[in-house]
Image (tube, rainbow, N blue to C red):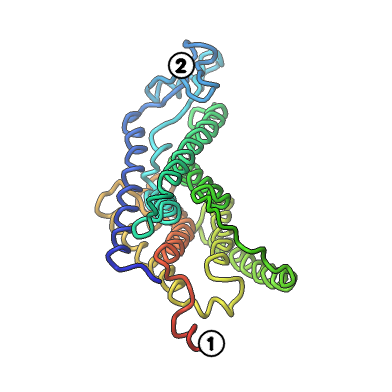
């Protein structure tokens, strides 16, 4: 049964507010740095690290001072750069950086908590506990990743993050999605006493062949698409980040809408929400960048053009499209409009 329109709007509003607030925290870290680097303070403790090496002692040093020290002949004076403005929030590609927490909070609220219309008071404490564990796991994993990134940040112009793919905000929210899917698959939010019947294995071979056939067809299609996007400077040059998201899109698409066209044609409503939502989202972020001048859309971007050259103004388009296709596909499932249409189901009967 599809969700009521009032609940649909409420879910979307809550997810957008939470994602914006979450990203605002990371923006605050960037604002704290200003035109300075955060560098490891080696005067405090063993290499300036504590808490199992996860949390650094850092201090702020003007960029020109760090660059001068790191380019002179004496390596003993070099600073270990931990982060600089832009490594946390990714304002130059704000549309991309906001898309990941949108997906994360949608999964947390709709699929784990059952918000807004399927919150079970009996299961709610367990589900809140699951979310708490997910948050803690995400933070710990990202501290490890940032420690590793900081250890490699020796060059005076190096950064934890490049254009989009590894911003600290993206790392945290990606981990939040990963752990949410893992814990959901393990069934930790529910622990129902009722066991389901074992699946009939006699149909596995035929279904597996069909699934793999169409999965490779879709993977080939997104591979060709990614190559075309990279060649036309509509994606990140190394393609690894963009391509990984397209692969994730294929897997989620098959999980949401079935593993062959005979199922896809019956789920036009959900696929329509996915495509229409993405087409509406792109101009919204385009207008947001024009209005603010600081929050980049990730494509057709004066910010990227100024920083990386006019030929790179659209290198975030591939990520923008793939991320928001995933978000609206998940949203269609959250509001229970990803199944076959009622008329087709009745016609089959």
Image position, residue 211 (x, y; %):
66, 69
Residue sitting at x 53%, y 35%: 141
Q: Residues within 10 Å of mark 2 (few under 14, many from 20)?
A: many
Secondary structure at badge 1 equals: helix
Instruction: Please determine whether, in this image, residue 132 is positioned above or below residue 194.
Output: above
Residue 41 is labelled as 2
Label 1 belongs to which residue?
348
Q: Secondary structure at mark 2?
A: loop
Instruction: Give the answer, above or below, for where 192 lies relative to 339.
Output: above
Which residue is rendered at x = 24% and y = 53% of the image?
A: 291
Foreground of the two, 41 or 50: 50
Label tally: 2
Is residue 298 in view from this perspective? no
Q: Residue at x 29, y 56 (%)?
A: 13
* Residue 117, image x, y percentages: 35, 60
Measured Cα–Cα span from mark 1 to mark 2: 69 Å
* Quadrant location, the N terminus: bottom left
Specify which label sits upstream in the sequence, 1 or 2.
2
Location of residue 35 in the rendering, given as x and y in whole percent from the top left corner: 34, 29
């Amino acid at each position: 049964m599809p969700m009521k329109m009032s609940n649909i709007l409420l879910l979307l509003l809550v997810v957008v507010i939470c994602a914006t607030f979450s990203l605002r925290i990371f923006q605050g870290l960037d604002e704290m740095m200003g035109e300075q680097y955060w560098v490891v303070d080696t005067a405090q403790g063993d290499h300036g690290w504590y808490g199992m090496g996860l949390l650094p002692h850092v201090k702020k040093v003007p960029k020109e001072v760090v660059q001068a020290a790191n380019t002179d002949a004496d390596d003993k004076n070099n600073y270990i750069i931990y982060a600089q403005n832009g490594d946390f929030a990714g304002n130059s590609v704000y549309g991309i950086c906001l898309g990941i927490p949108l997906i994360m909070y949608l999964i947390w609220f709709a699929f784990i908590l059952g918000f807004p219309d399927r919150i079970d008071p009996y299961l709610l404490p367990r589900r809140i506990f699951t979310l708490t564990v997910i948050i803690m796991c995400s933070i710990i994993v990202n501290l490890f990743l940032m420690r590793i990134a900081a250890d490699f940040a020796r060059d005076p112009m190096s950064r934890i993050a490049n254009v989009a793919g590894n911003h600290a905000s993206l790392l945290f929210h990606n981990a939040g999605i990963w752990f949410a899917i893992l814990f959901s698959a393990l069934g930790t939010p529910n622990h129902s006493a009722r066991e389901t019947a074992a699946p009939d294995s006699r149909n596995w071979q035929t279904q597996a062949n069909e699934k793999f056939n169409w999965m490779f067809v879709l993977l080939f299609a997104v591979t060709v698409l990614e190559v075309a996007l990279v060649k036309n400077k509509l994606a990140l040059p190394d393609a690894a980040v963009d391509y990984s998201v397209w692969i994730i899109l294929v897997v989620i698409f098959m999980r949401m809408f079935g593993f062959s066209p005979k199922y896809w044609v019956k789920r036009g409503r959900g696929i329509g929400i996915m495509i229409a939502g993405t087409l509406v989202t792109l101009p919204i972020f385009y207008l947001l960048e024009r209005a603010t001048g600081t929050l980049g859309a990730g494509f057709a971007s004066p910010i990227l053009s100024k920083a990386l050259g006019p030929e790179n103004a659209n290198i975030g388009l591939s990520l923008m499209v793939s991320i928001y296709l995933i978000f609206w596909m998940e949203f269609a499932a959250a509001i229970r409009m990803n199944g076959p249409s009622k008329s087709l189901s009745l016609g089959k009967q």
